[in-house]
Image (cartoon, rainbow, N blue to C red):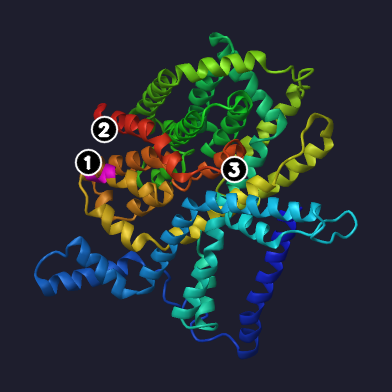
């Protein structure tokens, strides 16, 4: 309820603030440049930078160094530096989110103590809300961070691009021309994939395989972390992440493993999901960004990436299984002594699960057409109401927050091409692989590969290894941070309740290091 009230208030205030420039513009008329045909592209197109760089190189009589290139691009549009500074401040915010959430809990406890002591007057059954606790809780909500930092980004655009007149149109032009299909489809896929019939179907299949290991927490852990990531190549990574996170919560995290084991598993999950979508050319966002441009199909993906990813996933799981043998033995004891949870859950009929699977398949098939998959989602919600006795309540808060996170990341990330593109194009194969892996930790890996597809040198026939390296690096680094791969926020949103104070970014990165190194070795050492 508090979140709903805060969200409602935020929307109301945002509408009120945004209405001001709209009223002024309506009264004054659209300024010169309001027509998108007359407006200078924002952000500047790569061709603009290339022309300026060619002219500067001709004057110097040599090629520009990377530093000179970045300085020139910053001079072409000083806003580039401001946008990147805001983006890295948002990333820094994610590292202190846990501390902010702890402070929110502290203020809430103090507030409740004051209510019990009679120091704060109550009004009937409703207790006054602690504004300070709610504010810090909102600031510590990882999924809200990049959206919050859109406010200073919008202010910077208005200030530097012409104020409430021209600047407002620059901002709306940028928003209107950004692609938010991925955040929208992730919301729909998360909601459908987390529905009771889909989760039950996945649980049945995982249980069959876990039966080979005695259906212990370790057996479930290994089965989930192997099957779900590879399944992501066919049902998309966000759907696979949702199913895997829910099953891990039910079969592993609920037994409260050690913090080290928790973070190692989360990092392993993120890495496995990131590379597990490379068996096909249509499921992993970083692959999807380049497959059409570079002519990659399913046979190409499997022969160049898929089998290596599969080997890397199995090796990573075996390594972590060996590292946490004692922890798994303790979890087995906890599972054996766990109280009986009562009668088994009623399973939805197969035909209901089949209809849910059909809605999931429809969303995957039309994932580039928002009107179609949103329309399908509305039919899906109607179907869940018609079969309510076989359903659990569809949870939309988590998926919407994840979509909000991704939309903010898309908006910030779209302004980082001015420095990412020249960095990528300046590297050879091995440095490119390492560079793409590290850059992915600070930006969505789909953005990295998209920018690579815009670099002319990467499209040349002789650049096959460069193309391979940048995509391999992007998917390998997809587990290092929550922003590195689009499905990661979905997994964190589902599993964060098992981490006291929320997921710590540094501990997540440490948990993902070993599988990241293993996958890197598989992609770079196994034959091309």
Report the residue marked by disc 1.
430
Q: Is residue 165 above or below residue 329?
A: below
Report the residue marked by disc 2.
524
The magenta stretch spans which residues? 429-434
Q: Tag 3's secondary structure?
A: helix
Report whether 41 appears left or right of 524.
Answer: right
The magenta stretch spans residue 177: no
Residue at the image position 29 percent from the left and 39 percent from the top? 468
Q: Is residue 376 above or below residue 418?
A: above
Residue at the image position 37 percent from the left and 41 percent from the top? 477
Q: Which mark is residue 107?
A: none
The disc, 1 or 3, on the residue closer to the chain's N-terminal end is: 1
- Can residue 181 be seen in the rendering of this structure? no
Q: Which mark is residue 493?
A: 3
Q: Is residue 3 above or below residue 340?
A: below
State if disc 2 and disc 1 touch (CB < 8 Å): yes
Mark 3 crowd level (few <14, some 14–19, many ≥20, 10 Å Cα): many
Q: Residue 323 sits in which quadrant?
A: top left
Residue 84: where, in percent of width, then height? 39, 64
Which quarter of the rendering shows the C terminus?
Answer: top left
Mark 2 crowd level (few <14, some 14–19, many ≥20, 10 Å Cα): some
């Amino acid at each position: 309820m508090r979140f709903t009230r805060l969200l409602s208030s935020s929307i109301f205030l945002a509408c009120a603030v945004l209405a001001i420039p709209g009223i002024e513009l309506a009264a004054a008329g659209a300024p010169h440049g309001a027509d998108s045909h007359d407006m200078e592209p924002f952000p500047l197109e790569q061709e603009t930078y290339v022309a300026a760089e060619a002219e500067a190189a001709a004057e110097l009589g040599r090629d520009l160094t990377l530093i000179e290139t970045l300085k020139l691009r910053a001079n072409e549009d000083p806003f580039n530096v401001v946008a990147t500074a805001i983006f890295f401040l948002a990333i820094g915010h994610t590292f202190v989110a846990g501390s902010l959430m702890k402070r929110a809990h502290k203020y809430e406890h103090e507030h409740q103590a004051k209510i019990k002591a009679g120091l704060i007057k109550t009004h009937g059954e409703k207790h006054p809300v602690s504004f300070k606790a709610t504010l810090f809780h909102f600031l510590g909500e990882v999924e809200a961070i990049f959206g919050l930092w859109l406010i200073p980004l919008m202010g910077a655009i208005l200030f530097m691009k012409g104020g409430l007149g021209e600047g407002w149109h620059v901002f709306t032009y940028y928003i209107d021309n950004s692609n938010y299909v991925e955040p929208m489809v992730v919301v729909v896929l998360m909601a459908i994939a987390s529905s009771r019939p889909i989760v039950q179907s996945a649980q049945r299949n995982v249980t069959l395989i876990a039966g080979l290991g005695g259906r212990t927490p370790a057996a479930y852990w290994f089965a989930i972390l192997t099957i779900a990531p590879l399944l992501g190549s066919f049902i998309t990574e966000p759907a696979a992440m949702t199913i895997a996170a829910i099953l891990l919560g039910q079969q592993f995290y609920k037994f409260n493993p050690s913090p080290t084991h928790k973070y190692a598993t989360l990092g392993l999950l993120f890495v496995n999901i990131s590379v597990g979508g490379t068996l096909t050319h249509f499921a992993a966002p970083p692959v999807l960004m380049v497959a059409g441009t570079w002519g990659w199909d399913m046979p190409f993906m499997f022969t160049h990436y898929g089998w290596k990813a599969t080997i890397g996933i199995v090796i990573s799981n075996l390594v972590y299984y060996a590292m946490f043998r004692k922890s798994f033995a303790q979890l087995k004891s906890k599972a054996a002594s766990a109280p009986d949870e009562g009668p088994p859950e009623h399973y939805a009929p197969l035909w209901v699960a089949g209809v849910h699977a059909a809605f999931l398949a429809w969303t995957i098939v039309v994932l580039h057409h928002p009107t179609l998959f949103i329309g399908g989602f509305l039919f899906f919600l109607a179907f869940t109401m018609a079969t309510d006795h076989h359903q659990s309540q569809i949870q939309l808060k988590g998926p919407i927050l994840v979509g909000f996170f991704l939309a903010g990341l898309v908006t910030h990330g779209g302004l980082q091409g001015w420095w990412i593109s020249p960095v990528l194009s300046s590297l050879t194969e091995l440095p490119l692989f390492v560079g793409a892996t590290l850059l992915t930790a600070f930006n969505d890996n789909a953005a990295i590969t998209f920018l690579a597809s815009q670099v002319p040198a990467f499209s040349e026939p002789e650049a096959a290894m460069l193309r391979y390296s940048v995509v391999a690096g992007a998917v390998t680094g997809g587990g290092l941070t929550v922003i590195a791969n689009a499905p990661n926020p979905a997994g964190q949103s589902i599993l964060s309740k098992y981490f006291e104070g929320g997921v710590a970014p540094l501990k997540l990165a440490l948990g993902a290091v070993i599988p990241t190194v293993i996958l890197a070795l598989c992609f770079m050492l196994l034959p091309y």
